[in-house]
Image (tube, coloured by chain):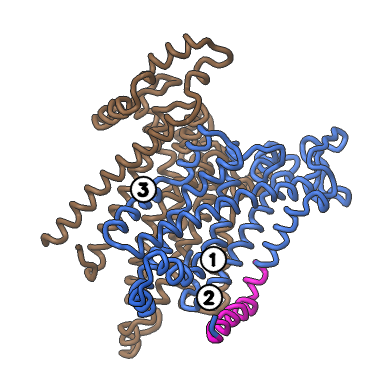
Chain colours: A blue, B brown
Amino acid sequence: MTAAARADRLSVLRQFARNRRSLVGAVVVAVMVTAGALAPVLAPHSYSTQSLVNRLKPPSSAHWFGTDGFGRDVLSRVIWGSRVSLQIGLVATALALVVGTAVGSVAGYFGGATDTTIMRAADIFLSVPALFLILVVVALFGTSLTNTALVIALVTWAPVGRIVRSECLSLRNRDFVHAAAALGAGHARILGRHLLVNALPIVIVQASLLLGQTILIESGLSYLGLGAQPPLPSWGNMVVEGRQFLASAWWIATFPGLAIFVTVLGFNLFGDGLRDASDPTLRGRSP
Amino acid sequence: MEPGLRTYILKRVAFAVLMLVGVSIILFTIMRLAPGGPEAVLIGGEFSQDAAAQIRQRLGLDRPLALQYLGWAGAALRGDLGRSFKTGDPVSSLILDRLGPTVQLTFGALALALVVAVPLGVLAAVRRGTLWDTLGSAVALFGVSFPSFWLGIMLILLFSEVFHLLPPSGLSEYGREGDLVARVRHAILPTLTLGLIQMASFMRFTRSSLLEVLRQDYVRTARAKGLGGGRVVWRHALRNALIPVVTVVGLSLPTLVGGAVLTETVFAWPGIGRLAVGAVFERDYPVIMGVNLMVAAVVITANLVTDLAYCVIDPRISYR
């Protein structure tokens, strides 16, 4: 890395740190990831122990978020629930990024018929309402963690592909790419060493925004009863359980939903901040 | 019409048809690749291999996959989407029955989102860096971060359970289906839920698009010749700024229809979304195919119309 490039990267970091919103986002994300990772230590009670005496107790010093219809501690369940959401979010996002980046960069770099074919295929995926397609796949193939993550990736790779493609399209004709080609670099080398490295900031920003989106999709699936169903609680199906007690015990549906909202907000703030820091001209653009 | 434009339109229409075929093939394949079939759901409980085979034969599921698809596609072209495995009703009439509520819900939400988002976006752009701008970006950020089903439930909690102002679910009151007041009261919460989620992207887009236009030379010219700020924004800048917003509205349709699935479930709203959820759980293949195809057709048509509208609105685009 040249000194100039290093200074550039430092200034991105500095920009990022100066943006208060993005710092808030980073803190929120850190707290949620920590909660998920340290759930066994942090959760004050078991997420599954039932207690009929303690049914539907409102928030108190013993149970900060109250208890649910089976007398289980809502706070502990919210903490454990972060695992399912974050796991599926991370796996789905990683898959979507890998596929989207690979496909998008090939389309943008080679152009022509390759580009047209790939982008038309992406169009098909963009034109089926995501939730409908997910619904069909998950209901028919089952609701394991892997399946859910796979199908969420299936409907989220296309926008990533589009963004990476347009980035590669604009990078392709820059002088340094021509220079690399003139020096005898092959397609793979130009793509990997020159285009993708330069497209990386955009991909990272996408990753953060996509994490928020995939968590939202996962919670929606859980709400419909199609989420992953390990023994662990998930935020989405906690909200469903709380729905029936809405009139008598508002806390059961409220807190897990709040957890989804805060986590997604954190990822969005973080992504927005990263984008602003890495490219000031994009400030305020929609994702 | 100039020949370039005509070729472009023809090409786009042909491609839209092709896409629809692509979607139907993908859906058909996914459905038939899935383990288990409708016979388990139809019979319920234990059943013999013989009974299952009989049912598969009756439903035509024993034929080769390609033949099944061609048979389905041929009928679909004639407007026949088959009959529900479960109830035996024609799929097209099932869809038609549910179409009204979903159309009402999505268009209501779309209208609500635009009515709030465009002025807010304009305010945020014109008063850049002020409280309005901050408020606007907060709305936008919250909008993309809310799980819609939870937002709906919180609205029910507030307006139905705590204040008893609005009904929590359904299309109307039983026995008073024709009553307009009852229908409007029932529509408020679901429309609000779906609309709030959609508002965010429209607002962000109006803002950034208007900011871009306000930097243009002709806006400066308009200002220089002495036009007032309001007139410049509303008459000159906004007209051009709204062109990309039209595209975003068109492209937002998949999100809107997808969001309707969750909103309809939360509010027990008898629309297409709930039809789809029910059909998926019961493996009612014809209904799943029919609903998805209909939704895809609507979305593809909307994208096509948006694209074509863009050419008409913005004469700078060339049609090659």
Q: Is residue B205 above or below residue A262?
A: below
State left or right for residue A184 relative to residue A32: left
**Which residue is located at x 38 percent, y 52 percent?**
A122
The answer to whether the residues at label 1 and label 2 have Cβ atoms under 8 Å apart is yes
Position of residue A215 measured from the top left corner of the image (x, y, whole percent): 59, 51
> Which SS does the magenta portion mostly show?
helix
Q: Mark 2 points at which residue?
A: A278
Position of residue B264 measured from the top left corner of the image (x, y, whole percent): 52, 40
Image quarter hosting the C terminus of chain B: bottom left
- In primary-sequence order, the first of circles 3 and 2 is 3
For disc 3, the chain is A
For disc 1, the chain is A
Do badges 3 and 2 share one subunit? yes
Q: How far apart are marks 3 and 1 (CA)?
A: 25 Å
Q: Name the residue under label 3.
A: A124
Do badges 1 and 2 share one subunit? yes
The answer to whether the residues at label 3 and label 1 have Cβ atoms under 8 Å apart is no
Mark 2 Cα shell of 10 Å, populated few (<14), some (14-19), many (≥20): many
Disc 2 marks a residue whose amino acid type is Ser
Mark on residue A204? 1
Mark 3 Cα shell of 10 Å, populated few (<14), some (14-19), many (≥20): many
Disc 3 marks a residue whose amino acid type is Ile
Q: Distance between the residues labelled 1 and 2?
A: 10 Å
Do badges 3 and 1 share one subunit? yes
